[in-house]
Amino acid sequence: MVSCPKRPALVALALAWGGLHEVSAFIAPSSRPQRLASTILAAEGFAPAVKERPPTEQANNKEGESSIDALSADEAKRALVDLIPRMTGDDEEYRLVESYINLLEEQYTPVQTLDFLNLAMAGEWQLLFSTNLMGRPSRKLRLRELVQNIKAEGFNGTLTNLAQWDYAEEEEGAFDATGHFAVKCSYSINQGARMVVDLNEHEVRPARGSKIPSDVPELVGLLHRAIPKEIFDPNAHAMDTTYLDADLRIVRLTGPNHEGVRNIWMRKGALEINPSL
């Protein structure tokens, strides 16, 4: 089991700030995910577990959980996508995220077809949320988008995590360099829908016409702090698809450092997210 602990900075990554049809995926019954739980730790770097709640608060939470359990998968999905870009770091918000993820994973009915899995998950996915802890952001770096591009071919494929960055090398807030940071990986499927990931290389590429940073190691260090660790370096880890439809994808990490971490991805361009509404 894992939790969504309270963080010093939000991990909700609606970086671009901007009728859902269910599509199942291929996953072994033995790899069904465990429920998220707010009092148990299962990933390196997590904050302390949430303290035991008073009886009155526990009763109110049970009533809220009962109402969430009555939701359909489509209703839970809409509530989750609506909540994430508006999160402020409140414990109740993380509890709701946990509940929505649990419901979606429990109601998810996969199919035993590899070709269908490849068709459903291929393409570009924008990161909405990670249950893993990130470091405090730096005013010298701004992430504008974090996208995962999957190219599938049978039991193998490539996976690239691409972050679009702006960098202020000389003065905080004065962004004079921009570009992309790519985490290039290959993967193989060897058990159900489990993707075993191997890191191939990291690549920093300034945009055309951008200033070239003079301190590339500092830039990479800032990117390492800003990007969820399981996305910056997924080597020696595997990803289980615990929910997948036409435009929402939830994966569970398993491995030595990020066991149980969930990433929530939205099909790029599928939905405009405006947290100001």
Image: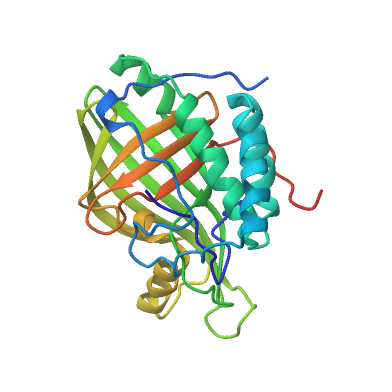
Relative image position of residue 154 (x, y in whole percent): 24, 22
Relative image position of residue 191 (x, y in whole percent): 20, 29
Q: Residue at x 46, y 29 (%)?
A: 106
Return the residue found at the far front.
55
Compared to residue 140, the image places residue 231 above or below, namely: above
Q: Residue at x 37, y 48 (%)?
A: 1
Residue 24 visible in this rendered orientation of the protein:
yes
Q: Residue at x 74, y 47 (%)?
A: 274
On the image, which quarter does residue 186 sit in?
top left
Return the residue found at the far bottom.
170
Comparing 219 with 26, the one in front is: 26
Comparing 176 with 85, the one in front is: 85
Q: Is residue 218 left or right of residue 6?
A: left
Q: Is residue 162 left or right of residue 54?
A: left
Residue 208 visible in this rendered orientation of the protein:
no
Comparing 242 with 21, the one in front is: 242
On the image, which quarter does residue 10 sit in?
bottom right
Relative image position of residue 222 (x, y in whole percent): 44, 73
Q: Residue at x 28, y 32 (%)?
A: 31
Relative image position of residue 41 (x, y in whole percent): 38, 59
